[in-house]
Amino acid sequence: MGGEERVWNIELREAEPVEEELRAFVNEARAGEGLEERSAEVWRWRAEAPGGAIVGSARDDAGELRAAVCVVRHPAILEGEVARFGEVVEVANAFAKGRGLVRAAPLAALLEAFGRVYCGAAPEGMPFLYGVPTRRAHRFLRGRAKAEVLRAENVLWAQPSGLEWLETGVEVTESEGAPEELDAFFMEWRRSKPAVLVRGRDEYAWRFRDHPTRSYRCALARRMGEVVGCAVLRMGEVDGEAGGILADWMTMPGDRECGMELLRWAREAVGGTDRLFVNVSDRSGEFALFQSLGFRVRGTDEYLAFRGFRRPTVMSWLFANWTYTLFDSERG
Amino acid sequence: MASYEIRPYRPGDEHAILETFNAVFGEGKEDFEPRTLEEWRWGFERNPAGNRIFVAMQGDVCAAQCAALPFRVTFRGKPATITQGVDAMVHPEHRRGLRRPGLYVATARPFFATFRGPGRDVLHYGWPVEPAWRIGKTFLNYEIVRTQTVLFAKPPEADQRMPDRVEEIARFDDDVTALYGRCAKDWGLSVVRDPAYLNWRFFDHPRFCYRVLGLRHPSGELRAYAIFRCADFPHPNCGLVIDWLVEPNDIEAGELLHEALRVQARRDGAESMLAVFPDWSPWFDRFQIWSWDVFGSDYLLIGIIQDPHYDTWWLRKHWWYQLAELDTV
């Protein structure tokens, strides 16, 4: 009998701050791919996301855990309407058990159930699930869970000392935590964005201030006292190269001066010697802006993958219209 | 329900294939220039790597076709073949000829059953638009290798002299094979650039004229080349860098050929210039240093990988390709 016909005991629920059994299971699977462990603090942080997180498990008849998933729900604006996008942060399967298609059956069943329960048209359902899978997960998700590649990801990089500067009327100040003016600026900024995750004070506080392992610095750009831009920076590595990573970036379309001033701040924040990195959609205005400010593009090993539950699901629409940065995923 | 004879191409089918091609691809296009028999023969009879064609015939009418242009490649140091899917079509009067998944898929399935597998084509690729991608993904195991980025630049605003050492090449000789060997030593997969392929692809093309700009070593041996053409793709009057074969550490040759391309673009009245490089190539970075900007395009580079030991992740990092591998330019 094929494993496809087997019934798995599937549980789907809101994530708790402590998920030790799932964490241990996922870490075992990650170790099999040579990936580092996820800490208990990271799992707790996910459960505290403004939109919450969902965990799922599939067990066999003996109660043994065979597959697990964790999805963080992010508030989003989709064509002007409130929605939630799901970031798939963990998929794990006990590939050592069973053979052939049987091996992957519990994870396939779990993801199918997840889609039925939580996904669909907004606002009730999540219209999109997305993530940056490992090579093994990508192969599985494409073949068994209807996931598609949205983009072969690029990274923009620059040596800050190589950037040219002009005087502008924009003033940049560093902000502690989540700045008060953020909500109002986001509402203005997102008007030209057909698909975007919400970047309000709550989201910033959770994503950046409360992150269990990373330290971020946030800066606001003002012109005549009015907020016109925002950038978030952390130190880290991209493909083994150390530098400053722009974890989020909001400037109004065409506002090059604001971009220059935020980059001036980032240059000073990284000490003027290391590299700066940023990841944005290659169809966005920001992608062109960064190149005009001296950044160059290079490929990465990453695919941004998604599964749509909106009908009709058009990959090219999301490809062209989703404005994202590293803020949108745990890569940030 | 209509019945069709689905089978490999037989000599003589080309007349029906051509008729359907011009009906399908000319549909609703006032500026469409019908494909000629000479063009068909160039692509499918004189290709040094042969052809791959399956048709669905109903009487004398080609109701559907699944076809590909094969290319000889070096795949991890050994000879092999890959194919570019081209001219996927169903005759307008036969689009309801079979229920879902439809006549095209019914024609494509035996095509792939015939040409895939050990010892056959290692990769089938294409740059489909989204509707064709959806059909291919659902029924034929298409996978996205990458969403395609392109490099754009503006030609010079004033006339300039062609760099002294750059010459126009009239036809490729055997020394191009040695140049290809030097360039390809670190590439996992690439179409073999030898006289048989290059002369067929560029100098014998029945519709397009290409400028082949080259540099030679003092010994006379070919050192590097770049191939250029002005086209209305992807927008009017675009100067396309069709092929670029320069050793990765030969920056001087690259600079001279790059300057020659800019001069040629200006002379040909191009309003912009476009090039495509794999993003792991040093030339992808070098062109940016030369003030080219990168843009995301609507094109998806897709592949059906026939060897289970390799996947899109491997292809993305090891496959050297150029616009030369796209038949429509």
Image (cartoon, rainbow, N blue to C red):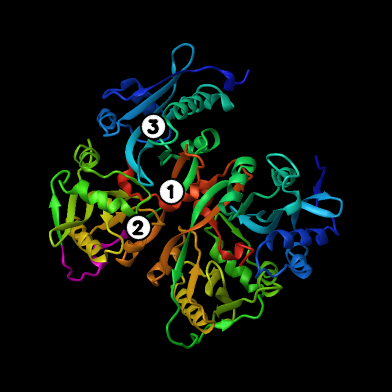
Chain of the residue on which disc 3 is drawn? A
**Tag 3 near tag 1, CB within 8 Å:** no
Question: Hey, which quadrant is residue A30 in on the image?
Answer: top left
- Per the image, label 1 sits on a secondary structure element best described as strand
Left or right: B182, with B22 as reference point: left
Left or right: A184, with B151 as reference point: left
Q: Amino acid at mark 1?
A: Asp
**Tag 1 near tag 2, CB within 8 Å:** no
The x, y position of residue A12, in whole percent, is: 40, 22
Q: Amino acid at mark 2?
A: Leu
In the image, B8 versus A65, the foreground residue is B8
Q: Nearer the viewer, mark 3 or mark 2?
A: 3
Give the mark nearest the N terminus, 3 or 1.
3
Give the mark nearest the N terminus, 3 or 2.
3
Give the mark nearest the N terminus, 1 or 2.
2
Write down the region rendered in magenta.
A156-170
Q: Nearer the viewer, mark 1 or mark 2?
A: 2
Q: Amino acid at mark 3?
A: Glu
Left or right: A119, with B227 as reference point: left
* Residue A161 falls within the magenta-colored stretch: yes
Question: Vertically, is A238 above or below A116?
Answer: below
Left or right: A198, with A143 as reference point: left
Question: Hey, which quadrant is residue B102 in on the image?
Answer: top right
Judging by the rendered image, the residue that carries numbered circle 1 is A301
Q: Is residue A243 visible?
A: no
Judging by the rendered image, the residue that carries numbered circle 3 is A124
